[in-house]
Image (spheres, grey):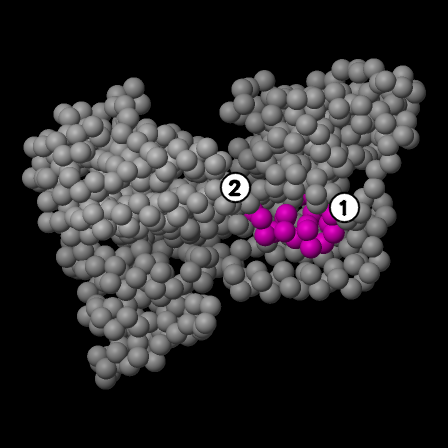
């Protein structure tokens, strides 16, 4: 434990904490005796789950210590913890974690959590956790520290999301879980699932052995008490078939850790710290076979959590988490939602792949009729067939019921006559990325629409204002830029032109929310947010190879960004012709800052870049691509080192983002980070892009200050 003289008053730091109280009441057991039932409740509605800051932990400790005294006097037979309706707890209060000043205080918080939750195993009577709903992070650790667990069959999610936030399960989870369900399952829950944004259902938690019994929702509390009474009386025997045995500890454990480490190294690289810290803790948990081993595991958790909370990745991750949880739900610049127009029917111009995805998403989320159109009936029929196939796939995976599949099938229809769009009050185009094409389709459909109808364009880089130049009512046009795949990617860039009125903008924001997307409002500027940043990176990558830097050097130089793919993997994914078009658009708008690569057009014409294996995985660069670039390289070309290239990209991005903010493309740097996290897969450990550029020193080098305060930036270390 930390020396008392050096202790920070954590409770004083948490003066604004929304305290989760622990309310205790006695419940008579069927076999006589008393069960203390502790209900966690922060007094807020279901939009604010129970969380634990220092004051909430101390409140729970007071209740547990009183119960321990009563147990010693023989007054109680057991204790159970549950939560307010539908929620056990969502773990540590991350808003309080962000206020921790240093490593010593961070370690105190870890130790406090261990001390308080540890009382559950030291009461002198059996302890239970009735998992009645959401249980994340520290909430799930409340359950693991108890002797026994029941789970409500309708509990929506159980998970340890910590490693995606730059930290680790530090209140017992990293030590207890693998000794309860085995190392391979624990690796999935603690490392793999959060990195893939997966959670467990109640049934999965029971199948893994996290919960001892799954009980129906309607009678969950009553059945849980009856089950606990049976355990206390000795009638109910609890078996733990997934707990590791001698063979697993001596052989399988270390092998599983090695395999997991290799998988991490190949998938996310060496930059993120928290997944590897979790691996170390899980490796050490093999020795937690007795109380001394458990306490050693807890001490290791304390140190690991303190190290991570004091580091820059956790600060950036918590900043990113706050963006996704708060700023995304309160978009900057959004008009009052009461101005939004009602959407009762949707029209989709186009019947290709993207248009088909739009049609299904609108029908599924808005639950309104959707009409698609294209230049001929064959294309319309192909689009409808594609949509029906997608509906069948959803039904086959159990994501929609047969009734819902039937509704979707019958709510989406097609036409070749734009006059049929007369009843649509939201019309979105998904046609070829060519200005005149988009102008033409809107000019044809507008005369058939009501004055209240909203027009939306999915353009990725064209001027929305220019697209609406031929409209009679340009005030009802808005950019509504999705990211592919449409059903999966959570971001929509909502683009306002000088003419777009508040009612149209409000409608777009309400529609985005109804689609379960996060929307960021952007000014009508080339590339908006995400594509402007990506175009900068791709332009610099092509400039580097065009001037003599090896493809391999360029492709690995940005590993420290922690991105989900390298620059050329990204270019391959979006398509060489699309990439060339995006780069051309930006070069035309900003010729002094965005590179014009003739070689990219040559690569696109030949359709060559990456050399792939039979599974489509890149294994190098196509020799034809190397030859195309080599032919045009200057004889005196001087290749850049990886560090020189990375610094050039960092400084270029810092300059471009600074210009975007000065030009009012978005309201703040936070909106750029949110766009890149949700729309381009930028990792939480960087906090997006602007905290990374601050830490790397690029902001200071380029414009003399930083995008953020030092608390967000973290240490300027490499």
In the rendered view, does 145 fall on the left or right side of 664? right
Tag of residue 666: none
Residue drawn where x is 69% and y is 37% of the image: 141
- Viewer-nearest residue: 634 or 153: 153
Q: How crowded is mark 1: few (under 14 residues within 10 Å), some or many (20 or more)?
A: many
What residue does disc 2 label?
398
Q: Is residue 504 left or right of residue 621?
A: left
Mark 2 is surrounded, within 10 Å at the Cα level, by few (under 14), some (14 to 19) or many (20 or more) other residues, namely few
Asked if residue 503 is among those painted magenta in the image, a careful observer would answer no
Q: Where is residue 7 in the image (x, y as percent from the top left)?
A: 68, 36
The label on residue 180 is 1
Q: Where is residue 644 in the image (x, y as percent from the top left)?
A: 36, 68
Residue 375 seen anywhere in this rendered image of the structure: yes
Q: In this view, does 262 lie to the left or right of 316?
A: right
Q: Main secondary structure of the magenta part?
A: helix
| Span colored in magenta | 170-194
């Amino acid at each position: 434990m930390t020396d008392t003289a050096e202790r920070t008053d954590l409770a004083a730091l948490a003066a604004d904490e929304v305290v989760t109280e622990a309310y205790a009441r006695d419940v008579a057991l069927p076999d006589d005796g008393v069960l203390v039932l502790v209900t966690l409740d922060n007094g807020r509605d279901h939009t604010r789950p129970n969380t634990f800051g220092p004051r909430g932990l101390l409140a729970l400790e007071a209740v547990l210590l009183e119960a321990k005294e009563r147990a010693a006097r023989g007054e109680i037979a057991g204790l159970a913890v549950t939560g307010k309706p539908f929620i056990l707890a969502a773990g540590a209060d991350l808003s309080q974690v962000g206020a921790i000043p240093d490593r010593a205080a961070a370690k105190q918080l870890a130790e406090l959590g261990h001390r308080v939750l540890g009382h559950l195993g030291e009461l002198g009577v059996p302890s239970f956790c009735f998992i009645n709903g959401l249980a994340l992070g520290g909430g799930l650790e409340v359950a693991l520290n108890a002797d026994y667990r029941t789970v409500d069959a309708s509990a929506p999610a159980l998970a340890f999301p910590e490693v995606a936030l730059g930290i680790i399960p530090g209140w017992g989870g990293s030590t207890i879980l693998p000794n309860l369900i085995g190392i391979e399952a624990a690796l999935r829950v603690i490392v793999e699932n959060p990195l893939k944004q997966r959670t467990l259902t109640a049934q999965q938690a029971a199948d893994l052995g996290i919960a001892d019994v799954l009980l129906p929702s309607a009678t969950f509390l009553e059945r849980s008490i009856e089950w606990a009474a049976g355990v206390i009386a000795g009638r109910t025997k609890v078996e733990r078939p997934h707990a590791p045995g001698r063979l697993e500890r001596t052989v399988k454990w270390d092998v599983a850790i090695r395999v997991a480490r290799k998988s991490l190294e190949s998938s996310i690289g060496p930059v993120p710290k928290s997944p590897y810290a979790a691996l170390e803790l899980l490796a050490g948990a093999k020795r937690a076979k007795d109380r001394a081993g458990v306490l050693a595991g807890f001490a290791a958790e304390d140190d690991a959590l303190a190290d991570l909370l004091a580091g820059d990745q956790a600060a950036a991750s918590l900043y990113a988490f706050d963006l996704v949880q708060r700023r995304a739900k309160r978009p900057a610049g959004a008009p009052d939602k009461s101005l939004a127009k009602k959407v009762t029917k949707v029209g989709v111009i186009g019947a290709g792949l993207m248009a088909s995805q739009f049609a299904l998403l609108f029908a599924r989320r808005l639950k309104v009729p959707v009409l698609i159109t294209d230049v001929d009936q064959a294309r319309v029929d192909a689009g409808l067939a594609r949509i029906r196939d997608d509906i069948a796939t959803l039904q086959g995976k159990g994501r929609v019921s047969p009734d819902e599949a039937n509704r979707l099938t019958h709510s989406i229809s097609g036409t070749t006559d734009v006059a049929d769009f007369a009843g649509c009050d939201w019309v979105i185009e998904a046609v070829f990325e060519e200005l005149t094409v988009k102008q033409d389709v809107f000019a044809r459909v507008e005369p058939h629409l009501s004055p209240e109808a909203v027009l939306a364009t999915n353009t990725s880089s064209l001027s929305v204002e220019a697209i609406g130049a031929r409209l009679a009512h340009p005030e009802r046009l808005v950019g509504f830029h999705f990211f592919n795949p449409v059903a999966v990617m959570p971001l929509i860039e909502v683009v306002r032109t000088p003419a777009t009125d508040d009612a149209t903008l409000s409608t777009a924001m309400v529609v985005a929310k109804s689609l379960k997307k996060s929307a960021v409002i952007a000014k009508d500027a080339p590339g908006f947010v995400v594509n402007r940043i990506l175009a900068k990176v791709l332009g610099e990558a092509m400039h580097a190879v065009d001037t003599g830097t090896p493809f391999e050097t360029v492709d690995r130089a940005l590993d420290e960004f922690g991105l989900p793919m390298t620059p050329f993997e990204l270019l391959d994914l979006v398509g060489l012709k699309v990439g060339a078009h995006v780069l051309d658009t930006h070069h035309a708008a900003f010729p002094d800052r965005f590179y014009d690569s003739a070689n990219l057009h040559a690569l696109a014409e030949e359709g060559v870049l990456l050399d792939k294996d039979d599974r489509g995985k890149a294994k190098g660069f196509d020799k034809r691509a190397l030859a195309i670039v080599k032919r045009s390289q200057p004889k005196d070309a001087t290749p850049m080192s990886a560090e020189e290239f990375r610094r050039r990209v960092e400084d270029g991005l810092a300059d471009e983002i600074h210009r975007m903010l000065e030009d009012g493309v978005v309201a703040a740097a936070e909106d750029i980070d949110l766009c890149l996290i949700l729309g381009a897969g930028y990792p939480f450990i960087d906090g997006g892009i602007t905290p990374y550029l601050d830490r790397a020193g690029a902001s200071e080098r380029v414009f003399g200050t930083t995008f953020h305060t030092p608390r967000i930036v973290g240490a300027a270390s490499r």
